[in-house]
Amino acid sequence: LRSIKGIAPQTATTVYSLLFMMGLFAQAGAGNLSDHVGYRSVLVPLSAASVIPLVLLPLTQGVVLLSGIVLLIGLRLGLMPVTNAYLIAAVPAENQGSSYGLVRSLQSYVGSTGAVFVGMLADNGLFDQAFFILAGLTVVMTVIYASLPTDFE
């Protein structure tokens, strides 16, 4: 926001905080909604909807528009609690602890490599492309969510 979009540091901090503010509401709302309508019914539309702001962010200028896009990107943070709940429900009770622990460890590893990958792209002047790649990966994620079995919900 500061170096690419030219926003003042204090304003950039405020705009960036919108991401986490929305994430707070998205996590609570998505988790509650998935309890009522099912995991996949929340994961698919939430994931699909989060593609659009990822594509728009590199193409947008101006604090007001960027603030709205950052808020929409914050909705993505609602995916993780629902994904975790799905994983716990999908794993048989007799090996839930070890299986879930392994999957969460793998998720953490893959998630942490994302920051390194985006950082490498940004260091090479490819920050916009990083968001387009994230949007593409989110499309793949949406397809995976859409194919999840729901027979245990």
Image (cartoon, rainbow, N blue to C red):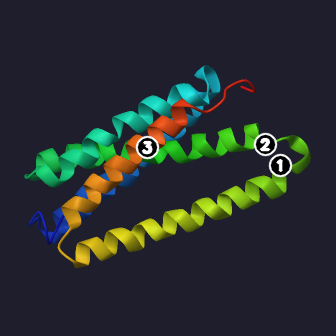
Residue drawn at 45 percent across, 48 percent down: 77
- Tell whether label 2 touches label 1 (CB within 8 Å): yes
Residue farthest toward the top in the current orientation of the protein? 37
- Residue 6 in view here: yes
Q: Which residue is mark 3?
A: 140
From mark 3 to mark 2, how far is it between C-alphas? 22 Å
Specify which label sits upstream in the sequence, 3 or 2.
Answer: 2
- Tell whether label 2 touches label 3 (CB within 8 Å): no
Residue farthest toward the right in the current orientation of the protein? 94
From mark 1 to mark 2, how far is it between C-alphas? 6 Å
Q: Which residue is mark 2?
A: 91
Q: Residues within 10 Å of mark 2 (few under 14, many from 20)?
A: some
- Find numbered disc 1 in the image and state the secondary structure of the residue it sits on: helix
Q: Residues within 10 Å of mark 1 (few under 14, many from 20)?
A: some
Q: Which mark is residue 96?
A: 1
Specify which label sits upstream in the sequence, 1 or 2.
Answer: 2
For the residues carrying marks 1 and 3, which lies nearer the camera in this image? 3
Looking at the rendered structure, the kind of residue marked 1 is Gln
Q: Is 50 situated left or right of 64 in this image?
A: right
Does residue 102 sit above or below 83 in this rendering? below
From mark 1 to mark 3, how far is it between C-alphas? 26 Å
- Find numbered disc 2 in the image and state the secondary structure of the residue it sits on: loop
Looking at the rendered structure, the kind of residue marked 3 is Val
Looking at the rendered structure, the kind of residue marked 2 is Val
Q: Quadrant of residue 99?
A: bottom right
Residue drawn at 58 percent across, 64 percent down: 108
The quadrant of the picture occupied by the C terminus is top right
